[in-house]
Image (cartoon, helix red, strand yellow):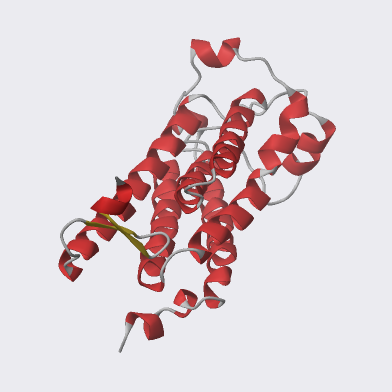
Amino acid sequence: MSRRSLWPWTGRFGRLGAIPAILLLHLGTYWVATRVNSARPEEALWPLETAVDRAIPHLGWMWPAFWFAYPYVLVGASWAIWRLPSSLVSRAVVAFVVMTVIGASIQMLLPARSPWPADPHPIQQMVHDLELNRPFASLPSMHVAFAVLTALFAVRAARGRRWLQWGFALGAGLISISTVTLKEHFVLDPVAGALLAGGVFLWWRQGTKRDAGVQGEPPGVTYDHLTSRATTAARRR
């Protein structure tokens, strides 16, 4: 049985459902992590605040950048996965799933409380009041982890279009900054989220290189795993 038949998302249209499904998984793991951590005593929570956190002002008007993460990940990651050759889609989907599960596991192993502000923007307060939301899924920031992993995949997918690459990088940067200026996270949280995303992306890249070696690419040929194009050394020169 082929890998394509095992994983329905490897088809050109089926893969569009991968990221929405992963975001639903993220909501589920968030629910579990926040309920487990909120049941713990206060002394069990890790103190993550630093002098840097105390120096960062609360900027309530940054809330659009924070919630921009959801369409950013949904559209950006789906677009990047759409451009992958079918043989690499499964590994990319697994990368997002593994990151989601690892992130929630760390949040429960190192429980902490988010620094929600006492005077949030009305939109921020409205979101905080939702039944799903609880300030107990802090380290790492999965908001940042998803944004950074999306940016890494999308920047590779946008090779040759620097304006698009910079746009994705800027989007991930703004989302990351908003997590600390809105006081949704401490500084350590987005740093940990970015490192988690970077590690998962390196795992994905190493796998694609290993697969290429097994397939035996001709000498002098570089294979672009994201666009399924081969480039000879002479052409590169």
* Left or right, 220 with reference to 35: left
Q: Residue at x 23, y 63 (%)?
A: 212
Front-lying residue, 201 or 186: 201
The image shows residue 90, relative to residue 61, as above or below, that is below
Q: Quadrant of the C terminus?
A: top left
Query: Most extreme residue toward the right, as rendered?
Result: 122
Residue 184 appears in the picture as rendered: no
Q: Is residue 19 above or below residue 61?
A: below
Left or right position of 164 against 102? right
Residue at x 58% of width, y 12% of height: 54
Q: How far from the left and from the top, in percent, is residue 236?
A: 31, 48
The quarter of the rendered structure image containing the N terminus is bottom left
Residue at the outermost bottom position: 1
Q: Position of residue 207 (x, y in %)?
A: 26, 58
Picture mark count: 0
Q: Position of residue 214 (x, y in %)?
A: 16, 67
Q: Foreground residue, 210 or 200?
A: 210
The residue that appears at 39% across and 57% down in the rendered structure is: 95
Residue at the image position 52 percent from the left and 65 percent from the top: 82
Q: Is residue 36 visible?
A: yes
